[in-house]
Amino acid sequence: MRRRSVLTAAGAAALAVPVLGATPAVASTGTGTSTGTSAGTSAGGSSGGGSDRHRLEVRGMDISSLPKDEAHGAVYRRADGRRDDPIRILADAGVTHARLKVWVNPADGYNNKRHILPLAKRLRRAGIGIWVDFHYSDTWADPSHQTKPAAWADLDVAGLTRAVYDHTADVLGALRRQGTPADLVQIGNEINGGLLWPTGKNWGDDAGGWGNLTTFLKAGLNAAHDTTPRIRTLLHIASGGDNGTSRWWYDNVVADGVDFDVIAQSYYPFWHGTPDAAAANLADLATRYDKPVLIAETAYPFTLQSEDATNDIMYDPSQLTPGYPATPAGQAAWLRTVADLMANVPGGKGLGYCYWEGVWTYRPGDGWDPTDPTSGNAWENLALFDFRDRALPGLKTLGGYRG
């Protein structure tokens, strides 16, 4: 996910491919190098009616914006208005994992190793697991943008492969050495179209091809396991309700021998289809590849109002999902629906879900563009803290879900 308009996000639709209904099922080619606990053996049992529902192991939140937001004066309050450390608020709400994006050389100096190391210490003290999200860029990476870091711009395939390995190992190794090893890691962010464009692009006339992409993925995965042997690895695309694109993508990756642990998807209802479509897609992927599935990003507005002059991503009633108003209760109901969807993935393979940037409240100077300190925040009405900095009911739903 990046700060983007609805029109920009719609560019991802160009990556859609026909549903591959005639394609034979593809089993996982890996032996499962991770030794982490699987979704099917997480704490808690099935609940109710003989279904496969279970307590979700991952009830996460992306908090990448937190260091910069705090540096610009952000404060966070419990639902009753009491000010507190936001990490403590999340932990007390039951959040299990915090997702932290990593850029290579960002213009504003945030979302890099220097900032995630102290944040990881805060998370570990609070008992929250660490989930690292490598973008392999100096800025936002998503289905429409996968720009090489400036320092890597002139590297060939071999050089980029080495750079991916070294960068991944550097960050994860530093986390392990300070006593805060990552629990989960993404090798790329919303990589429907590949990464490190155009060399690692997997579609279009200027594509470098699947071979380059899978070479880069293997480099990142190897670095993750070399530095943090017990880590669980995720490959993340943004096609939560699109089974055709999902099969096309994971079929190609698995066929090329890429060994990873978890299928991760972005699922925003305003871009990625109905809950029924997402449920069907995730159930199919879990069965087809015999892997746990995870919603790496989701969100829903608690209001359609904006706190600044920037046009928010969600601003019009036509963008809402029927039955889920843009209210605190509607936001919480959406999260309950997503959690139920994951809890009902067949075979207990629904690992959990993650709310994207739930702490990104409005503060001047912490806008979407890392090159422009005057840029605004188009996300504050989708955070899990309201315009008075108080925790919303959705936070309790996110962390307290029990199936």
Image: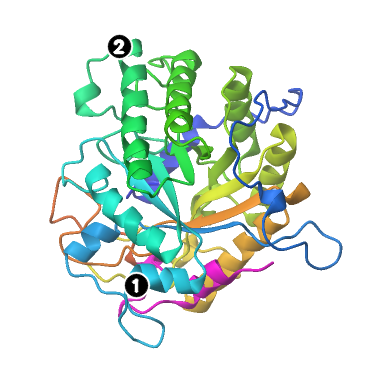
Stretch in magenta = 381-403
Residue 313, visible in the rendered structure: yes
Q: Nearer the viewer, residue 280 or 34?
A: 34
Label 1 CA crowd tier, 10 Å (few <14, some 14–19, many 20+): some
Is tag 2's residue or tag 1's residue first in the polypeptide sequence?
A: 2
Comparing 206 with 151, the one in front is 151
Q: What element carries label 1?
A: loop
Q: In this view, does 25 lie above or below 371?
A: above
The percent coordinates of residue 297 (x first, y second) are: 48, 51
Residue designated by label 2: 156
Left or right relative to 370: residue 53: right
User: Residue 258: x percent and y percent?
Assistant: 56, 23
Kindly identify the residue that appears in the image at 34 percent across and 50 percent down.
5
The image shows residue 274, relative to residue 396, as above or below, that is above
Residue 324 is covered by the magenta coloring: no
Could you say which is closer to the camera, residue 102 or residue 197?
Answer: 102
Q: What colour scheme governs how the chains and residues are painted in the rendered image of this protein?
A: rainbow
Look at discs 2 and 1 and give the one toward the viewer: 2
Q: Please provide percent x and percent y for residue 169.
A: 36, 31
Q: Which amino acid does label 1 sit on?
A: Gln
User: What's the CA distance linking mark 2 and mark 1?
Assistant: 47 Å
Residue 398 inside the magenta-drawn segment: yes
Q: Quadrant of residue 361?
A: bottom left
> Crowding near pointer 2: few (<14 within 10 Å), some, many (20+)?
few
Residue at 85 percent of width and 66 percent of height: 49
In the image, taking residue 325 as reference, residue 403 lies left or right, namely right
Viewer-nearest residue: 267 or 39? 39
Label drawn at residue 305: 1
